[in-house]
Structure formats: C-alpha cells, structure tokens
Amino acid sequence: MKTKFFLLLFPLISLTSCNVRKEINRKSFYFDTYVDIRLYEGKDANIEIIDKMFSKVDKLTDNYNERDLNNIYKINKTNDSVAIEPELYDILNISFSSDLAALNYFNPFVGSLSKKWKESLENKTVLSEEVISSELSKMQSSNLEFVNQTTVKRNGESEIDLGAVAKGYALDKVKEYLKQQNIKRYIVDAGSSSILLGEKDGGKNFVVKVSNLENSYLELKNCVISTSSLSRQVVEIEGKKYSHIINPINGSALNLHEAVIVVSDDGYLGDILSTDFVNESLDSIKELEQQFSVKTIVIDNKEISYKSEGLEVIKR
C-alpha cells in the first residue's frame, strides 16, 4: 500500500533512552516513512550499505511509481512476463507462499481494492458495495505465475501490494548483514511499525514503550517488533472507524481489533501476521501464533485483550 495514507502505520511502540555509549546513525525516507538506523558499534560504511538495502527494497516494492528498475508498479501494468531482481523475486515468493495459506486476511492482490478505498476515504465517503464486489471478483480471478527464477507474470486485473511485507523483508536483510559484520548493538526503526532490535551494552534488553497503553513497556532484544495500529490512521464516518488495512475476504476497511503487536525472529513474518491478526478472532490468533512461533499482544479499547504467555508488559 504505497501511499502515505495507506502505508504508514502510526506509532504504537516507541523506544526509550538507549543508554549505550557510541552511536552512528542515519535517518532516511523510504516506504513513505522515516527509517532511523542506529548502530552502537561498527563504521559509517555499514550505515551506507544498510541505507542502500532499504533504498532498493523501497524501489522494488513501489506500486505507485515507475522506478529505474522493474518493480511492482511495472508488474501491475502488464500481463506480460517481467524480468525482476532477485530481491523482488524473493519477496513475491514469500508473499505467495503456501506456508501462509492458514492466514485468512492476507492477500497480496489487495492492491487495487486498497487504492479504491484510499480515494473514497480521502473524500470522507464509504466505498460502494458494487465497487467492492467488483474488486473482490477481480482478486479471485488473479494470480501470479513464477515463470522461472528471474521472471514473473501477473494474470488478471488486480494489482499486487507488498506494503504488508516490504519493510519487514528489508529488516531481515539488514539483520543478516549485521550478523555477517558481527555487529550486535543496534536499533533499526522503520517508521515505528517495524522495529529491528539488537541488544544494548552487555547483552541487555532495550526498553520499548507501548504508546497506546498508559505507562506500559516491553523489555526486548534480538527480535523484530511489528505493529498494525488503528490508533491514528483512521477515518470516522457516521460513527464507524475505517482504516488503512483492508479485509481481503469481504472488502471492508473496518477491522476487528484496534491494534496488534507481533514479536518475531523474522521481520517479513511479523509484518504479515500483524496485518492479518487485525481481523482474526482471538482464538485464531492463539492458534496461528503457535504455528508460526511468534508472540502477540492484541489491544482493544486501549486495553490488552490478549497477550502471549511469556511476553511481559511492565508497568512503570
């Protein structure tokens, strides 16, 4: 969902003081949000490489603009085969993987419907059932064909949207690079909705504030925190709150939960699951988090409605 309205997941989580000695940092604008890279060891050259990683994934997953390489925008504009970069092939392979078949509310072909909702909500109107029905029909008849290891072909009319996986994937590539460089102390904050944590001095945890819960904190390290939040990015029409996260089953922009936090080892997975979990029942979330080995916090009405065992929320 590559617009400011649809992609930005406003901060549910913020970091407190890091209490680390040295810092090399860079703040850049990718995925329609600010990406804050902070290394507490390493060199300026490491920041440069990480910044280029984010830049490339941002270009590849942009579904609104043509870039200087074949990207999602290019794929969405044709039903011909398109030769793509290895990173985009990898992201698409992940997004259309059968491993995600258990998820009810994640569908990369939601792009066209998301754009329709964006236009409608910007005008403070609810998208018509006729348009929703038409877009859902297009989604059902669309598919992505992996022609070979370097080429894909979109069949159908629906557009692909990788907004629910792009930042998490980029964080995974960064984590892999930092591990190769033996850099352990870092924070990479991709717009507060996706945060990669290393560790503090002495292998200690970072303290992370849960902004929507009063005086509530998490103590975590060596993980990715993924957040889907309706706390700010929402349009209220006739008493109903419509969000940037679209239900791909019924086409609605109304969501079941106010916010979901997923703590995982893999950024791509955490981002996908937090998006899906916003519309999953609590019973389904409990089953899915076991299946995917993640921990979850669900927030409704500014209170925790579900929290995984072993994930402690500290009151201060």
Image (spheres, rainbow, N blue to C red):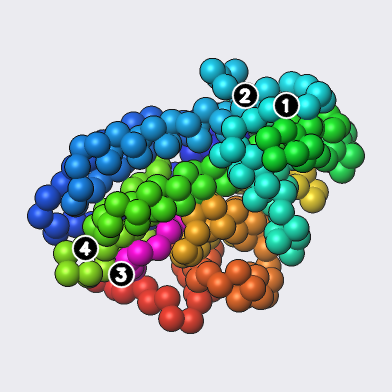
Distance (Cα) linking label 4 and label 2: 39 Å
Distance (Cα) linking label 1 and label 4: 44 Å
Question: Left of 234 or right of it: where is 26?
Answer: left
Q: In this view of the protein, which residue sits in the foreground, 54 or 303?
A: 54
Q: Amino acid at mark 4?
A: Lys
Q: In this view of the protein, which residue sits in the foreground, 248 or 52?
A: 52
Q: Which residues are magenta?
A: 216-226
The quarter of the rendered structure image containing the C terminus is bottom left
Picture disc at residue 70: 2
Marks 4,2: beta carbons within 8 A = no
Q: Amino acid at mark 3?
A: Glu
Disc 1 crowd, CA 10 A, few/some/many (<14, 14-19, 20+): some
Identity of the residue drawn at 77% across and 44% down: 251
Q: Which residue is mark 1?
A: 82
* Secondary structure type for disc 3: strand
In this picture, is 296 found above or below 244? below
Q: Amino acid at mark 2?
A: Asn
Pair 4/3: label in front: 4
Question: Left of 293 or right of it: where is 160?
Answer: right
Question: Left of 147 or right of it: where is 184?
Answer: left
Picture disc at residue 147: none
Identity of the residue drawn at 31% across and 59% down: 198
Q: Which residue is mark 4?
A: 200
Which of the two discs, 4 and 2, labels the residue nearer the N terminus?
2
Marks 2,1: beta carbons within 8 A = yes
The quarter of the rendered structure image containing the N terminus is top right
Q: Which residue is mark 3?
A: 219
